[in-house]
Amino acid sequence: MEYNFKEIEPRWQRRWAERKTYRVEPDPTRPKFYVLDMFPYPSGAGLHVGHPLGYIASDIYTRYKRLKGFNVLHPMGYDAFGLPAEQYAIQTGQHPAVTTEQNIARYREQLDKIGVSFDWDREVRTCDPDYYRWTQWAFLKMFDSYYDNAAGRARPIAELVARFSKQGTEGLDAACTASMSFTAAEWNVMDEAAREQTLQNYRLAYRADTMVNWCPGLGTVLANDEVKDGLSERGGFPVEQKRMKQWLLRVTAYAQRLLDGLDTLEWSDSLKEIQRNWIGRSEGAQVFFDLKGRDEKLEIFTTRPDTIFGVTFMVIAPEHEYVSRLTTPEYQEAVDDYIAQTKKRSERERIADTKRVSGQFTGSYAINPFTGAEIPVYISDYVLAGYGTGAIMAVPAHDSRDYAFARHFDLPIIPVVEGGDLSVESYDAKSGKMINSGFITGMDVKEAIPAMFAEVEKRGLGRRLVNYRLRDAIFSRQRYWGEPFPIYYKDDVAYPLGDDRLPLTLPPMQDFGPTAEGEPPLARATDWKTAEGYPYELSTMPGFAGSSAYYLRYMDPHNDRALVSREANEYWRSVDLYVGGIEHATGHLMYSRFWNKFLYDLGYVCEDEPFRKLVNQGMIQGRSNFVYRVVGTNKFVSLGLRDRYETQEIHVDVNIVKNDILDLEAFRKWRPEFADAEFILEDGKYVCGWAIEKMSKSMYNVVNPDYIVENYGADTLRMYEMFLGPLEQSKPWDTNGIDGVHKFLRRFWRLFFDKDGNAAVTDELPAPAELKTLHKTIKKVGDDIENFSFNTSVSAFMICLNELGDCHKRAILEPLTILLAPFAPHIAEELWTSALGHDTTVFDAAFPTFDASHLIENSFEYPVSFNGKMRFKKELPLGLTPGEVEAAVLADPAAARYLDGKAPKKVIVVPGKIINIVI
RNA sequence: GCUCGGAUGGUGGAAUCGGUAGACACGCAGGACUUAAAAUCCUGUGGCCAUAGCGGCUGUGCGGGUUCGACCCCCGCUCCGAGUACCA
């Protein structure tokens, strides 16, 4: 009986489903482990061979942990709301509810075929009202909270209201959009609208009129992480800046905690670095500059207070609130022109030519508080309204942007740090000796910065300040396919819906398309009002809303009284291993950390960080094949001969090429225009060229996992995906190599059954060499799984089989079957039951115990090198002293040959490793 | 520009602690079995030289350094990939 995966695999998959083998419940008697995959968007194209990589890796780890006695939670669901699902629906002209359902069914079918051990009873879908009820619930909690900076946590807004009525803003340190100051008396006489206006300044979910990323192509606003190079991440449409009234989440309140939390996590350094850069903490000082002839001061932020003696002009952003006040009548027209001109430039144009210098003098002057010099105030779009205070002190000698500006407008450049050549470029380095700088002259930059901080505070010019690049997340989308906001309006004042009215379900609509003007599709739902007739919020939540707390919902997916019960949360706690793509670094992974910390502050979850350890699987690229058509003919020339002709390179479907040899018949049938193709062959074969490119339909290099399962089986697919290379590295898919893994499984099978299908397993006692091989493999495979080095563990299995040869002994094969089970669960189950005769599943077994005593031998082979260069090997008994080893090696005739009569200068003996003789 | 990765045979990759570089697999070449094919098995396979046999030299992107010994550590480059981009 041969290894018949086509029969075995579906049979076991059915059994696992029927018996609910992978269902899991909290069990206080066993340690828990939570393995999570980033749930997919059910897009229309289905899976290609790259998608399951992470699922296979996490499944191997899950099955391994089960064998180690852990109670493993390993759920799966679908991120079904949001732009990708909706765009697909629009493209195919169907309702997103319909396409989502279809795509999920297709996805599930493909996942089942690769034998992944999910507990499907815990499946969640973000578009399901029973699920998004809790997304809406969390939003309302944020609406009802503010962030107390002094306490370092979120608190109910009711506490803030109580405080306002007693002491106003006196002594308040809370995260806010703009700092406010009022007394209790002032608060107490405010009407409801005015109070709500005030509270919006503090709520963690709030509505504000701000500059947003508006994408006309998608008809919606986007968060910063959804925009790449001025284009939308989905669809690649241009994005422009526009002032709009939007809902936002006050993520910035958590900036420092999001940064500090990174140090406690087992994430890759590169991922942590991406998040650190995104948060963008910078330490500096706020400094107030007097304005000539005015009562007001201009507030700036700088990280280089040491260079303040070198300030020769000031720049404020064109959107800065002082622009109109600072502009003198004679410059009014020029300033207006400049503002109009910058508004016309799209975000993309602005990014494209950052080298172009532009700006306009306002006619006003500021006073340098240290030199007393009068310095002109300019506006320019190189200063951003949204960062710091939207105003800077310009030090052209030591900042390249200020330098370019000064050169363009012919402004003075005063060096205050020694170094560089200011006739060519600015000297930006934070090192060197201070010059022309009053009391700090002669100090090093590193001393001057703290000295200046102290002086600024002493003179009351400003104070030390930390700034973050992180922005509050824009939370509303002018689209249909998302969670409705549980918010209604009375006279344009936002009111939350009571918990008892959740979920607020999305109204069914036939005409759900977006508009280019920004009017949300829900505006077309005529009865989208509360029972009392108040209009609901018309925009919907963004894609990241539903994915921000899904890992909590999996712990207790059917609870209709809470997002997650306290008991379930205290058992499962947080995700121990999270596997997914690095593309979510500044999106989902930031938002869900924020969301989790917020719920933690309010006492709904018991862990401050959601994802303890995170592994980013690499991308699987495609391997494209080419044929070479002789220009102007229908003749195709083989790779090696193409230099003799003028040829044109054409992508050819990789599925009709094997080992770079083209299947000529299949090629003629592939496309009608090639039906009468002629070939110029080498050695009777047509050899194709190849290249590594992104896996995509247009390059004809997409390999479908269904095809691999059909031809080689799921176990081969699983092992081969791991064998391709390190999990975290991007690597090309090349079906050519798959035979090696498949051959391994067939060979493994033949150890259990002979040619006629009779069981071949014997109860003979294993030989020492066989035990050595077994235990070496147990050690290697166990260590490799712990280190996520699955490619080398697959190799370890192959080496094991090469060493064992024809071994049919139960004492060897039984532990090997368990060892293999996480990688190739179907064949392992089959061999465990039919060949080894067990009536339980292989996953009820225990992972084999490593016994080092089988590895010890009574002699050791020392590699002997001369001057570090390996020359020969010497086998010696174990237990010799280094001196005895040295004597034995020097007595060897081979050593005499290399020594050539000379005495060795030095002999280095590293026990268990090497002997090096220095001549 | 800045930040972080990476570069090893024809190919994917291994060498996890500074100690035999190229494990394992693909591909290729040769052979066995077979009417033939498939399947299976055996041998060889970094490069150069030598070859009856032993063997020798060289070799981990480039140039230096530390060390008895470097793919690994240090300094200086080149190239590739990713993130970010007027962040004051």
Image: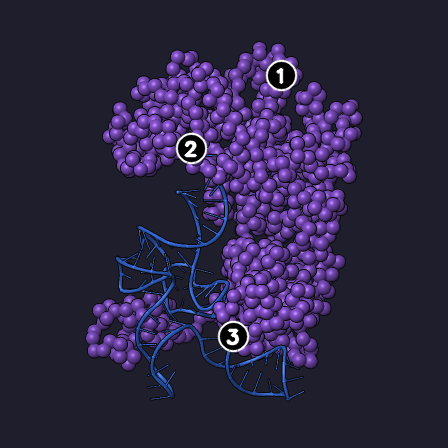
Chain colours: A purple, B blue
> Can you tell which quarter of the image residue B63 is in?
bottom left
Which residue sits furthest left? A902
Q: In the rendered structure, the residue with mark 1 lies on which chain?
A: A
Q: Going by the image, does B21 lie left or right of A228?
A: left
The residue singled out by tag 2 in the image is: A357
Q: In the rendered structure, the residue with mark 3 lies on which chain?
A: A
How many C-alpha atoms fall within 10 Å of the one at disc 3: few (<14), some, or many (≥20)? some
Q: Which percent across, then down, holds residue A476?
A: 64, 33
Q: Is residue A869 above or below residue A399?
A: below
Residue at (67% x, 68% y) in the render: A675
Residue at (72% x, 64% y) in the render: A10
Label 3 secondary element: helix
Same subunit, labels 2 and 3: the answer reads yes
Nearer to us: label 2 or label 3: 2
The residue singled out by tag 3 in the image is: A803
Residue at (63% x, 36% y) in the render: A216
Q: Earlier in the sequence, mark 2 or mark 3?
A: 2
Disc 2 from disc 3: Cα separation: 70 Å
Q: Visible in this render: residue A612? A: yes
Residue at (66% x, 34% y) in the render: A516
Front one among A163 and B3 = B3
- Point out the image quarter for the N terminus of chain A: bottom right
Front one among A411 and A16 = A411
The residue singled out by tag 1 in the image is: A194
Q: Amino acid at mark 1?
A: Ala
Q: Going by the image, does A878 lie left or right of A527?
A: left
